[in-house]
Image (cartoon, coloured by chain):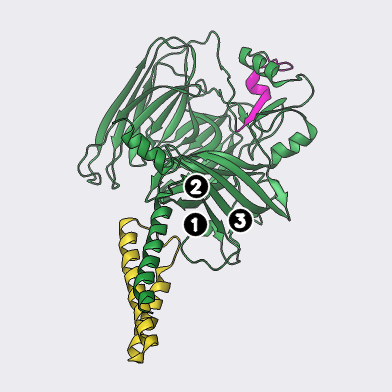
Amino acid sequence: MKGLLTKWPFLLGVIIVLAFFVLKFVPSGHIVYERDYSQTFRSGKGFVLGFTPAERVDLSQTLPKLIGDPVYFSLFTPRTFDTAKVTIVYQDHLSSSTPLIEMGVLKDKVARSYDLQPVENKTLAALAQTWTKIGTSNLMLLENGKNYSDLKSFQADLASGALKDCPSGSSTCLATYNYAPVYNFTLPGLKTSAITLAEPLRGQHQFYVYAASSTLDLAFNFVDMNQDAGPDPITVNLYYGAKMIDSRQVADNDPVPASGVAVEKKLALVEKNLRPGVYKAEIKITDDTVIKSIQSSSDKLVFINHLWPVSASGPLDLYTDAPYLLVKAFTPASLQTLSFGGQDFNLDAPYQQYEFDAPASAAPKEIRLNRDDVILDSNSVFSWSKDSLFNPSLKKVDNHFAPDGIKYILADYQAPTEQNGWQSATRDFSLTGSDRENGKYSFLLSVPGLKTGSDDYLIIKDIKVELQGRSLWEKLKALYGNK
Amino acid sequence: MEINKLVRGIFYWLSAMLGVFIVMEIIWPNIILAYFNLNWLVLGVLVFGLASLIKK
């Protein structure tokens, strides 16, 4: 009995503590964490945490109901991993206005950018039933007709800009989903001139700029407002296609980030020996920083998907080819009646995102804002003048997709599987370079167009995450192998 | 007498585990709480602590 009270309890304690050490370091580099929402009793907090924000989730039943978009969940991991295979089991009660479900992992906290993967795309699934399908789920081509018999010949024609039955150019008859094809957008014979955009913009932005010659000069003036705690670094990346060709940074060395004293900063990119074509600039800044002005050697410059004008001296006129506009007034002072495509829309509540659909027209639509500090989002581009407007993006098969004029769709998509009335989708994410704060990776679950108050909802039953990383042996080898 | 010793032994053991877990949780936040709610262990310490006093 004495041994039982002294030796065995001690050994048992040591084994339990060692077990937690193993769970902390995951020596094999592989572990699975799961949250089954149908199980009400849990011994601990678990690893899959969330959902937030609370107003977009109905927790009155056993299983959480997602009633707004987007919602977030986080994954606690005791160490870092390289990849995550996320399996989500769900039941959708969604109407035709919300055909898309996407999931993503947070890549960049400052730019709030997520690596999004499709969970389900009902528009694509419906088209796959009626259109001709070529290829595999990794890359499939849907065509409205029968012009191609294999993917290779289609890709060759796309690269040369001569798609069959597509006389107005690839961008008018090709749509994509979860895939960026090799595609060169050119405007032959176009002459550009220098421009200064002096309308201040707040927070991160992206824009396309068309370089008609071999040089491209971009200069930025920023104002760090120093109103929020935390540093406000500035990064500007320049891309040609998917390849980053330049990146410049300005560090925030201010010892008191929330001093309230505004500080001006400058950054310039001078690019030579460029191929004429479209370049994408990505301005990664916090919401505490304002882009005071942009000087560009090319006036063909359009902002991508998002625009947040601030500190305007008067009404603002913008142009877009988007069929809809998502608008949010950032302050009560920004409430107004705005004009979009010649029609007036009331923005009558702050902090709430409104969707305004423009009257159908192919021409560029004018947006007239009477007040600034309004956040504009769309699936298209914005420009400050009608002449600057161009859209090199291919159409995306999203919740606003209309197949008018579209003859081809290129997609990397695998439909979810169904069992006993529950859909299950497994998607792979790279965690390398993902944002991990306080031991947690942040994930997003999005049903674009899902609004609180509608009858649509999504029930989540289970989230399983299989993590893969370096084993302890590989880590030790990397640590000591080079010495 | 033997039961009294066993109850006290469990009390000491649970207290030691609670101490070790709290230290581990301070060093690596969430590593214990993700798997196990320490409230159960605190409850065990209280129950066996009180039981060992009553037995006396």
Q: Residue furthest top?
A: A189
Q: Chain of mark 1?
A: A
Q: Is residue A50 above or below residue A99?
A: below
- Which range is magenta? A163-178
Q: Mark 2 falls on what kind of element?
A: strand
Q: Mark 3 is on which residue type?
A: Ile
Question: Callout 2, which amino acid?
Answer: Phe
Q: Along the polypeptide, which appears first: circle 3 or circle 2?
A: 2
Q: Does the magenta-highlighted stretch encompass residue A165?
A: yes
Q: A215 or A59, which lies in front?
A: A59
Chain B representation colour: yellow
In this rendered view, identify the residue nearer to me: A155 or A425: A425
Residue A241 to residue B43: above or below: above
Element carrying mark 1: strand
A323 in magenta:
no
Does residue A212 show up? yes
Give the residue at x 46% y 27%: A207
Q: Dot 3 surroundings within 10 Å: few (below 14), some, or many (20 or more)?
A: many
Q: Which mark is residue A400?
A: none
Locate residue A171, reporting x and y percent: 63, 22
Q: Residues within 10 Å of mark 1 (few under 14, many from 20)?
A: some
* Residue on which disc 1 sits: A50
The residue to which callout 3 is attached is A460
Mark number, residue A443 = 2
